[in-house]
Image (cartoon, rainbow, N blue to C red):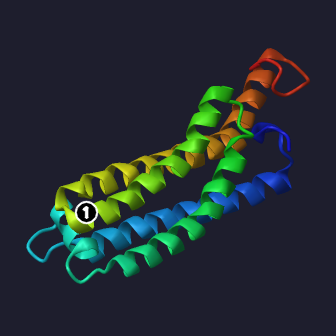
């Protein structure tokens, strides 16, 4: 597959639809966490709310194993799809490798926090850090990919037109 700015319109449309669909899904997941974990005493979700909702005495280790399995198997294609699109961006290879690997490393940290918090509530911060890292990495990859798909070619075409070049993108490279 060509770099994102050089893709034909049909691939840009497909990749954009996939990225936006997954992005909305991530926002829905964050909204679900907020409304399902918030205590009835406030408007802001706290680490204690998260610990109580997921890891209280009512949550068995068997249930945690089932949830971990479902989440890890379900998120694998999401991480892979976003990463696959993102690796075709024009940013430095080291950054592409870094951001693509982060969700695959951060989510197991998140999940390990579930089990650790089941026994000792302060480990909820492991879950928060792991979740925050994989959400950050997905956000960076989605936004960078969308920028590379649409804004970079537009800017290159404008620069090319301003320099009188007949080949779009030459002036910006």
- Give the farthest residue toward the bottom: 58
Q: Is residue 50 above or below residue 140?
A: below
Q: Residue at x 79, y 37 (%)?
A: 3
Residue 170: x and y in percent read 83, 20
Kindly indicate the quadrant of the structure image that contains residue 98.
top right
Q: Residue at x 45, y 64 (%)?
A: 27
The residue tagged with tag 1: helix, strand or loop? helix
Q: Is residue 148 above or below residue 160?
A: below
Kindly indicate the quadrant of the structure image that contains residue 156.
top right
Q: Residue at x 54, y 60 (%)?
A: 23
Q: How many marks are shown on the rendered structure?
A: 1
Q: Nearer the viewer, residue 96 or 114?
A: 114
Q: Residue at x 51, y 47 (%)?
A: 105
Answer whether residue 39 is visible to the viewer in this image.
yes
Going by the image, does 28 lie left or right of 118? right
Q: Which residue is mark 1?
A: 117
Answer whether residue 46 is visible to the viewer in this image.
no
Kindly indicate the quadrant of the structure image that contains residue 41.
bottom left
Q: Is residue 116 above or below residue 73?
A: above
Q: Quarter of the image containing the C terminus?
A: top right
Q: Nearer the viewer, residue 33 or 126?
A: 126
């Amino acid at each position: 597959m060509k770099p994102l700015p050089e893709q034909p319109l049909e691939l840009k449309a497909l990749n954009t639809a996939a990225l936006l669909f997954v992005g909305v899904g991530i926002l829905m997941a964050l909204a679900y966490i907020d409304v399902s974990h918030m205590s009835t005493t406030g408007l802001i979700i706290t680490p204690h709310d998260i610990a109580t909702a997921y890891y209280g005495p009512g949550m068995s280790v068997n249930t945690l194993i089932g949830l971990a399995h479902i989440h890890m198997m379900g998120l694998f294609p999401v991480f892979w799809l976003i990463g696959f699109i993102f690796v075709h961006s024009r940013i430095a290879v080291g950054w592409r490798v870094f951001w693509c690997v982060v969700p695959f490393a951060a989510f197991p940290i998140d999940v390990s926090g579930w089990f650790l918090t089941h026994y000792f509530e302060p480990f909820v911060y492991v879950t928060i850090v792991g979740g925050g890292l994989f959400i950050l990495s997905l956000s960076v990859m989605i936004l960078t990919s969308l920028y590379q798909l649409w804004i970079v070619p537009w800017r290159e075409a404008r620069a090319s037109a301003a320099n009188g070049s007949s080949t779009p993108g030459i002036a910006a490279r």
